[in-house]
Image (cartoon, rainbow, N blue to C red):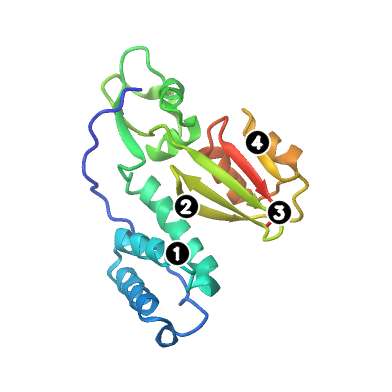
């Protein structure tokens, strides 16, 4: 793949508005959790998406899971932040820059970088990729390693990107697929239908856009 040097981030997206985190009040928690939750509140007030993201990751990684009762709320916040970091900030840990060369097409560029055509369109705010021009610079997901973990009992699916939690999705109804690990086929929607894995229309569209063929899908009884 032809990934050029990645420039520093330019844009600063607005942090999504969330309801206050429910559960035990901040003052009743351990000092470490209390300080991190206060830091998260500050990051959201300051609209600092990187600070908010790193703070949630620290809370969720604490030994003994002292914030387990609010973990789902934290995971959903983190997923919303990560989605904005990818598609609005073009975070350089995931996104590279490719210059269009003679003979290139958007589909070819996405494929060479192990990404999807749909994610390339969204990263570049394109509705029609037929008119990309030689010399034009495009954003592209660079060799993303997605793993989708489907949790049957919890009726949620967690998407990881390059070894770290990326976003959580709700499942609709019971999952028919047995526990085990599989690889996504070329037709994402058909794959999920055959496995009896049902997402909301919005969640399904996001996953179809993000997941390249051969991405790992793990089904757990949890």
Location of residue 145 in the rendering, given as x and y in whole percent from the top left corner: 47, 37
Which residue is denoted by mark 4 in the rendering?
182
Q: In the structure shown, which secondary structural element does the residue marked by tag 2 occupy?
A: strand
- Residue shown at 40% from the left, 61% from the top: 57
Residue 68 has which mark?
A: none
**Secondary structure category for the residue under label 3:** loop
Assess disc 4: are there few (<14), some (14-19) or many (≥20) residues with their C-alpha within 10 Å of its C-alpha.
few
* Residue contact between numbered discs 4 and 1, judged by CB atoms under 8 Å: no
Mark before the other along the chain sequence, 1 or 3: 1
The quadrant of the picture occupied by the N terminus is top left
Residue position for label 3: 221
Disc 4 or 2, which lies upstream in sequence?
2
Q: Is residue 156 left or right of residue 72?
A: right
Residue 2 vs 82, above or below: the answer is above
Name which residue lies at 70% across and 49% down: 198
Q: Which image quarter is the C terminus in? A: bottom right
């Amino acid at each position: 793949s032809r990934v050029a040097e990645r420039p520093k981030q330019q844009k600063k997206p607005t942090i999504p508005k969330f309801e206050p985190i429910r559960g035990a009040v901040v003052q009743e928690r351990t000092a470490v959790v209390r300080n991190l939750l206060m830091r998260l509140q500050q990051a959201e007030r300051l609209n600092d998406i990187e600070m908010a993201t790193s703070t949630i990751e620290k809370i969720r990684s604490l030994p003994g899971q002292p914030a387990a009762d609010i973990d789902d709320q934290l995971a959903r916040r983190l997923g919303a932040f990560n989605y904005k970091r990818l598609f609005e900030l073009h975070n350089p840990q995931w996104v590279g820059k490719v210059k269009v060369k003679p003979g290139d097409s958007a589909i070819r560029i996405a494929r060479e970088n192990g990404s999807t055509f749909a994610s390339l369109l969204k990263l570049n705010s394109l509705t029609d990729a037929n008119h990309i021009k030689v010399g034009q610079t495009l954003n592209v997901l660079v060799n993303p390693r997605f793993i989708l973990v489907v949790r049957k009992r919890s009726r949620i699916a967690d998407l990881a990107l390059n070894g770290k939690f990326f976003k959580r999705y709700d499942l609709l109804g019971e999952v028919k697929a047995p526990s085990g690990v599989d690889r996504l086929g070329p037709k994402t929607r058909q794959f999920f239908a055959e496995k009896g894995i049902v997402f909301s229309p919005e969640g399904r569209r996001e996953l179809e856009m993000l997941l390249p063929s051969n991405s790992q899908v793990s089904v757990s009884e949890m």
